[in-house]
Amino acid sequence: MQKARVSLGVNLHCSEMLSSKEADKMDETAAVMRKQQSGQSQPISRDVCRGGGDKLQLCRVMRPDDANIMGNVHGGIILKMIEEAGAIVGTRHCNTLNGERCWVALVRVEKTEFLVPVFIGEVVHVSAEITFTSKHSLEVQVKVMAENILKGTKKLANKAALWYVPCSLENADKILEVPPIKYASAEQEEMGRKRYEAQKIVRWETKARIEEVLPPPLNPEPHTVGFSQSSLIHLLGPSDCTISDYVYGGVTMKLMDEVAGIVAARHCNTKIVTASVEAINFHRKIKKGCVVTVTGRLTFASNRSMEIEALVDAASLVDDEKVSYRAVSAFFTYISLDKDNKPLPVPLLKALFTHPDGLCDDPLKSHPTSLRDVNSSCQ
């Protein structure tokens, strides 16, 4: 009786004899796998999906440690998962060609709306897809679905668009070229190009507005900007960073959402929830070992919602010159809720409060980095 062939270290007990052609094919497969296991694997070559680039889906169940003080999933957790999915699909795509290896750095998150709350016990599915590439950047569209596995229902919780640039593993300041994707139509490519040009202009305008954060006055009155202004200081460690020792964009976004939530809660003295993020601009990379100061302050309040500016300043803890620099900026929108999670009116900002140069009748002019007013002092 012919001896059964052994492939990949597993005995194949077959009722019929293998043909020589089948056997040769199995031998080739085994040889490839042995080569990969011995550390001689080659870069994977694959075609980009037509009409949208590489795709990825992450999913995990929401646990109690993902909750905010209301018991729902913290908005910062969702933002962090969105960025993780975008970074994975972006890094994978940018390393499809033979050449210098790289990782992708987040430079901007477009306006993101939190459509419905996500609850503990639900399974969150984060789908990411590359929708546009320029020579040195790529756009990733992300969709977040929340699944109740007990009821068998799904709901759209969030949508976002993120922009990345590929940075060399050997030199983080070196921006590499992005492999192009194939588009389903010329119209799709043109729409992506318009989005690319628009975000590039806004990012440069935002950089030009960077100014120093003013400290709040002593003993500020309730419902003034200074009364609710809050700061958080965090030392960035290995768990916050990529393999290149630069902080994940999702970690920064979570810290910003936490500070903005504190500001909203102090202003309203009620339960609050993130409604949307206007845009998040990443001006400079933050390296491991830096101390970040995340500051949040109210810039506008209507009867239904409040706008909060969140700023991230970073400084190295170990370098001789501990120069602080503006790393990230964003605007968050929050709403106030009652005990039954129904919207409450938001207290308006008071018109008068102390300014270093005297009383100011415009609360936004005491905080010049607001998008609503970029003057450096009261007029």
Image: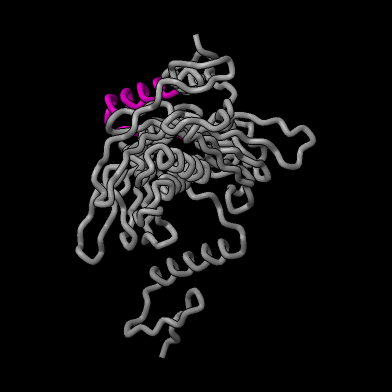
- Of 162 and 361, the residue lying toward us: 361
Q: How many marks?
A: 0
What residue is rendered at 41% in x and 21% in y? 351
Majority secondary structure of the magenta segment? Answer: helix
Q: Residue most toward the right?
A: 320
Q: Is residue 212 magenta?
A: no
Q: Residue most toward the bottom?
A: 1
- Of 226 and 4, the residue lying toward us: 226
Magenta segment boundaries in residue numbering:
177-200
Q: Quadrant of residue 111?
A: top left
285, above or below 377, in the image: below
Coloring basis for residues? one colour
- Of 334 and 66, the residue lying toward us: 334
Describe residue 251's horizontal placement relative to residue 52 as left or right: right
Pick the quarter of the image with the N terminus: bottom left
Residue 378 x, y percent position in the rendering: 51, 12
Describe residue 240's horizontal placement relative to residue 63 as left or right: right
What residue is rendered at 52% in x and 65% in y? 33
Residue 295 x, y percent position in the rendering: 54, 35
- Of 131 and 39, the residue lying toward us: 131
What residue is rendered at 25% in x and 64% in y? 149
Q: Is residue 181 magenta?
A: yes
The answer, for residue 139, to whether it is visible in the render is no
Describe residue 272's horizontal placement relative to residue 93 as left or right: left
Residue 318 x, y percent position in the rendering: 75, 42
What residue is rendered at 57% in x and 65% in y? 37
The answer, for residue 373, to whether it is visible in the render is yes
Describe residue 302's horizontal placement relative to residue 318 as left or right: left
238, above or below 192, in the image: below
Residue 154 x, y percent position in the rendering: 23, 54
